[in-house]
Amino acid sequence: MYSHLTQDTLISNHLIVNSTPVGTFPNINDFSPTPVEFLTSQHLIYDLIYNPEETKLLQLGKKSVHRLKTD
């Protein structure tokens, strides 16, 4: 359950796999409620959605990690 994804959970689990249809075309602005604010450059996000190629979840993950690198 997404409610179990806490900062502590993400610290000890670096692989995140989204296997839901959330974010699939045409609803490309939807994303699973993953707490991206806790992601680091040590995390790997894999989204099984293939349309769009880069989902909103992946975009938010990149932005979160990039923010950490520039802070």
Image: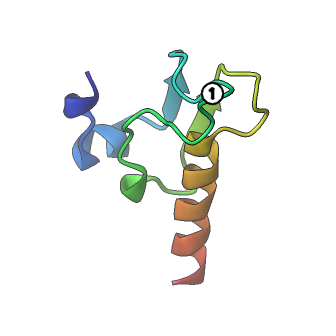
Quarter residue 23 falls in: top right
User: Residue drawn 52% across and 62% down?
Assistant: 64
Near mark 1 (Cα within 10 A), the count class, few <14, some 14-19 or many ≥20, is: many
Side of 41 where 7 appears, left or right: left
Q: Position of residue 6 (x, y in %)?
A: 23, 42
Q: Position of residue 5 (x, y in %)?
A: 27, 35
Side of 37 where 30 appears, left or right: right
User: Residue drawn 45% across and 53% down?
Assistant: 39
**Residue sitting nearer the eye, 58 or 45:** 58
Vertical relation: 46 (above or below) 65? above
According to the picture, the residue beneath numbered tag 1 turns out to be 47
Q: Position of residue 35 (x, y in %)?
A: 35, 47
**Residue sitting nearer the eye, 38 or 32:** 32
Vertical relation: 49 (above or below) 61? above
Quadrant for the N terminus in the image: top left
How many labels, in total? 1
Furthest residue in direction bottom, as rendered? 71
Q: Position of residue 33 (x, y in %)?
A: 36, 37
Vertical relation: 66 (above or below) 32? below
